Image (tube, rainbow, N blue to C red):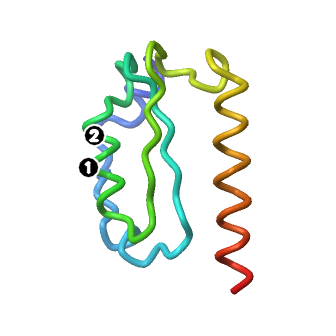
Amino acid sequence: AYARRAMSGRDMQHEDVIAKFGTPVLFIVGDQDRIGPIDQLQGLARQFASARVSVFEQTGHSTFAERPDRFNAELREFVLAAQGTASR
């Protein structure tokens, strides 16, 4: 609740920054997340040149806590792939 109040009224449009962002991006979201709904993250991901959305079924907002093994495996895979891209 505090974060919502603190951020209310702030300009959250960052398309100018996103357009310049060249680093791969991974969004991990739970299909039951009420804080960052899937459709919002998918829309945001489309704004990046290199973004991927991974949806965890039967999971809420805390994917890292609710599904730590899968979260860590996907994050590791993403980082290793990004490192391979960066070294080229």
Q: Quadrant of residue 33?
A: top left
Please name the residue shown 35% across and 19% down the image. 34
Residue 31: % across, % down = 38, 22
Q: Is residue 86 above or below residue 47?
A: below
Q: Position of residue 57 (x, y in %)?
A: 44, 20
In the image, what residue occupies the spot 32% across and 29% down? 37
User: 19 left or right of 21?
Assistant: left
Q: Residue at x 45, y 67 (%)?
A: 50
- Whether residues under marks 2 and 1 lie with C-beta atoms below 8 angstroms apart, the answer is yes
- Residue holding disc 1: 43
- Mark 2 sits on what residue? 40
In the image, 40: left or right of 66? left
Q: Is 75 left, or right, of 10 in this rendering?
A: right
Instruction: Bin the neighbour count of mark 1 within 10 Å (Cα to Cα): few under 14, some 14-19, many 20 and up.
Output: few
As helix, strand or loop, the secondary structure at mark 2 comes to helix
> Which quadrant does the N terminus fall into?
top left
Q: Vertically, is 32 above or below 38?
A: above
Q: Is residue 15 left or right of residue 88?
A: left
Q: Residue at x 33, y 73 (%)?
A: 16
| Secondary structure state at the residue bearing disc 1 | helix
Which one is nearer the viewer's eye here, 39 or 5? 39
Q: Amino acid at mark 1?
A: Gly
Q: Position of residue 23 (x, y in %)?
A: 56, 70
**Amino acid type, residue under disc 2 in the picture:** Gln
Q: Position of residue 13 (x, y in %)?
A: 28, 57
Quarter of the image containing the C terminus? bottom right
